[in-house]
């Protein structure tokens, strides 16, 4: 049997993305633009290319020149910023995406967990979904049958196993889904960020299960934001940055590399520019003033935005906070909320903003940043200029994770004075 | 080690590489095919009051309406001595089967986009799994046909033994264009609007409510380019026996068109499926 089970050779993946260019709202111009778009889409179709939304099309390399080798029985983690190409890499290895360049050699049966509960059907019962999900993950009916009791046992939802999963709570659903996945037995396993389900007690069980899997001598490739879990489970780390392989080596060194790359290297981003201004860089800062990608709920929002201005007076800076579904959840405007305009002398200016603490639910967020003129026309806008993640949110200080996906909104409302309960005496008759 | 493990299989992933493992994978994932088909069937009549009875009600009422409109009001001729209702139903059976396969399978990759973007399996399983739903409804309709034939005292002869062949042909007629559409619609969502339209028009240009014999003889061959003509003629031949002779040149044309569409469908699907996850 060959010793190398995964070999990636000069792996590259290109996506084509479309931009919506923001112009002023002149009808004629808009008509010309949509006509031009129609012609472009028609031409694309004749050439057999995909239809891309937006006015301008750009190539984007999600992965570039990635080489590595993984030996039998190794447990390796892949770490990197949001958008560094981690998931793209896993998707290529698990044959969901086709590489644009390079090649991959795989030896052995592969299973991948890019999400828990893939293909779960709301109308089917827990029992039926175990078989459905098992088949989707590549298990045979026999395999599922022989592990059925273990799966149900692990999930802790025996009582509801014949109830349609649409009646399950979010937690039960996630536990059942993870339990099926946890009982996959293939030689090579790819796991993407699936530990972020359930309550903290269940997360601990998931971690235990993952380390059990890792110790069984199977090859595991593991993507996570949870650096503590990464450090505990794996001995080797691959750091990706901007689609390129930044580091490949012992996990401690990999985590150090990753943390270091967070605080520098953002300056080389190019976001283009507007007519009168250009946003050059934007960062979320931690308590020590270093750039970070995680936010601790209930602490001040420290942002640093660098803007290049011309002699145009009256430009303002706007921030739009968005949740994981890209819905706007917060807004700040320097010209309206603070009556402060951008300096009108040409040059670069650094804005330091400290916004009131928000008790955000755990999950992913982003800030769109824009400069706008007095007439509220956007001059230069950058979507997702800052992306960050709230790893855990426990408003009560107990082991309860208030998550975006619960559907209760993104803000945990906090009391400003202790909760008071007064007994109301019955009215005398 | 599990039962389905093969002695270390080697796999190369590369851009544009013809996947030699594809057909072997298809065999390995056969259980997924059955379970997806089972899922579609199981879910279809959930939370409906009369459940499977819908499979009875719809074709029955369509038959009554078509018999009145085409047979009584328009006074179109039947074939031989066959009662008009039986003629209509023998056309309705393959039409319903083929049209439901076409509409379900054409959109199937999109409706299962969640699977396509998260796990690997030979994608061609998805459209084929939807065929089973159509076949279940078809089996229910067969019961109605038997009832209607009993009512009119129509006794089938040996021709009926050929019916399974024509059922397979009806599936083949539908799955070819459906595969093509399922692949193309991922890239160009426009086809989501085209397919229901084609199905709607198809009902009128196929001899569902009337006999194909009402088409003038000199146009028969051209008419058979619509592969549904061959299928419906075949059904009537199998069910009505001697009353509905098969027009062989036309049937051959229908077969050729079907074979071509099937080839085109599978080829298009195989060529584009590797890019599905990029586009969905």
Image (tube, coloured by chain):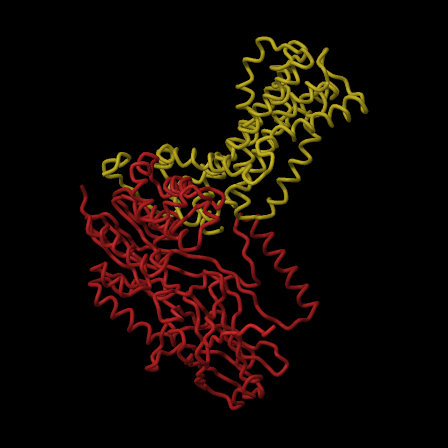
Chain colours: A red, B yellow
Residue A385: x, y in percent?
Answer: 46, 72
What is the quadrant of the N terminus of chain A in the image?
A: top left
Give the answer, above or below, for where B172 lies relative to A94.
above
Q: Tell me where residue A371 sits by quadrant.
A: bottom right
Which residue is farthest front?
A429
- For the residue pair B220 and A138, the one nearer the viewer reads as A138
Location of residue A265 with respect to A175 vertically, above or below: below
Q: Which residue is rendered at x = 68% and y = 63% of the image?
A: A31
- What is the count of numbered marks? 0
The x, y position of residue B210, in whole percent, is: 72, 23
Q: Which of A70 and A139 is in front in this view?
A: A139
Q: In this view, does A353 lie to the left or right of A92?
A: right
* Front residue (pair A200, A57): A200
From the viewer's perspective, tell me whether residue A106 is left or right of residue B242.
Answer: left
Quadrant for the C terminus of chain A in the image = bottom right
Task: Name the foreground residue: B115 vs B263.
Answer: B115
Q: Where is residue A21 in the image (x, y as percent from the top left)?
A: 57, 68
Q: Is residue A255 above or below residue A309?
A: above
Residue B122 vs residue B173: left or right?
Answer: left
What residue is at 53 percent from the left and 69 percent from the top?
A: A328
Quarter-of-image position of residue A267: bottom left
Q: Residue B151: where, in percent of width, then height?
A: 68, 15
């Amino acid at each position: 049997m060959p010793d190398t089970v995964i070999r990636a050779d000069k792996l590259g993946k290109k996506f084509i993305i479309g931009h919506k260019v923001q112009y002023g709202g002149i009808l004629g111009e808009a008509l010309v633009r949509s006509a031009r778009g129609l012609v472009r889409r028609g031409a694309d179709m004749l050439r057999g290319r995909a239809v891309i939304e937006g006015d301008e099309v750009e190539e984007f390399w999600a992965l570039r020149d990635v080489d590595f080798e993984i030996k039998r029985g190794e447990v390796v983690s892949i770490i990197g910023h949001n958008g560094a190409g981690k998931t793209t890499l896993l998707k290529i290895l698990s044959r969901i995406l086709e590489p644009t360049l390079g090649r991959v050699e795989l030896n052995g049966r592969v299973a991948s967990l890019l999400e828990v509960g893939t293909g779960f059907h709301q109308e089917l019962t827990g029992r039926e979904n175990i078989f459905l999900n098992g088949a989707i993950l590549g298990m045979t009916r026999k395999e599922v049958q022989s592990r059925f009791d273990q799966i149900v046992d692990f999930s802790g939802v025996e009582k509801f196993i014949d109830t349609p999963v649409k009646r399950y709570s979010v937690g039960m659903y996630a536990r059942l889904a993870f339990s099926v996945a946890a009982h996959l037995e293939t030689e090579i396993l790819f796991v993407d960020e699936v530990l972020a389900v359930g309550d903290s007690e269940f997360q601990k069980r998931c971690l235990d299960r993952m380390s059990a899997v890792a110790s069984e001598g199977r090859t595991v490739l593991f993507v996570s934001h949870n650096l503590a879990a990464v450090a505990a489970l794996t001995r080797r780390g691959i750091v990706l940055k901007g689609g390129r392989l930044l580091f490949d080596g012992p996990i401690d060194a990999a985590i150090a590399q990753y943390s270091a790359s967070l605080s520098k290297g953002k300056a080389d981003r190019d976001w283009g520019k507007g007519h009168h201004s250009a946003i050059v860089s934007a960062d979320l800062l931690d308590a020590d003033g270093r750039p970070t990608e995680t936010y601790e709920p209930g602490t001040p929002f420290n942002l640093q935005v660098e803007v290049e201005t011309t002699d145009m007076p009256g430009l303002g800076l706007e921030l739009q906070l968005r949740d994981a579904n890209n819905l706007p959840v917060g807004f700040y405007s320097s010209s309206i909320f603070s009556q402060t305009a951008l300096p009108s002398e040409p040059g670069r200016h650094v804005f330091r903003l400290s916004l009131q603490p928000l008790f955000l639910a755990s999950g992913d967020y982003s800030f769109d940043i824009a400069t706008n003129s007095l007439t509220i026309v956007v001059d230069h806008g950058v979507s997702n200029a800052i992306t960050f993640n709230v790893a855990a949110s426990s408003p009560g200080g107990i082991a309860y994770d208030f998550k975006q996906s619960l559907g209760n909104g993104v803000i945990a409302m906090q009391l400003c004075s202790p909760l008071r309960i007064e007994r109301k005496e019955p009215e005398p008759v | 080690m599990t039962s389905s493990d093969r002695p270390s299989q080697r796999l190369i992933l590369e851009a544009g590489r013809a996947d030699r493992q594809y057909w072997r994978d298809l065999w390995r994932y056969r259980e997924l095919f059955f379970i997806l088909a089972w899922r579609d069937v199981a879910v279809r009549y959930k939370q409906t009051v009369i459940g499977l009875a819908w499979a009875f009600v719809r074709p029955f009422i369509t038959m009554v309406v078509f018999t009145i409109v085409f047979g009584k009001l328009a006074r179109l001729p039947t074939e031989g001595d066959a009662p008009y209702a039986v003629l209509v139903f023998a056309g309705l059976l393959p039409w319903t089967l083929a049209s439901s396969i076409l509409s379900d399978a054409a959109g199937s990759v999109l409706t299962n986009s969640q699977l396509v973007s998260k796990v690997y399996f030979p994608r061609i399983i998805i459209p084929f799994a939807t065929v089973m739903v159509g076949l279940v409804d078809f089996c229910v309709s067969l019961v109605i046909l038997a009832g209607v034939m009993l009512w009119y005292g129509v006794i089938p002869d040996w021709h009926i033994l050929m019916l399974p062949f024509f059922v397979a042909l009806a599936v083949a007629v539908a799955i070819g264009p459906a595969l093509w559409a399922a692949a193309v619609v991922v890239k160009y969502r426009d086809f989501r609007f085209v397919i229901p339209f084609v199905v709607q028009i198809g009902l009128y240009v196929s001899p569902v409510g009337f006999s194909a014999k009402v088409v003038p003889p000199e146009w028969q061959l051209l008419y058979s380019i619509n592969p549904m003509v061959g299928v419906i003629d075949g059904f009537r031949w199998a069910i009505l026996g001697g009353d509905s002779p098969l027009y062989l040149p036309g049937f051959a044309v229908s077969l050729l068109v079907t074979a071509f569409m099937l080839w085109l469908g599978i080829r298009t699907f195989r060529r584009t499926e590797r890019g599905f996850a990029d586009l969905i």
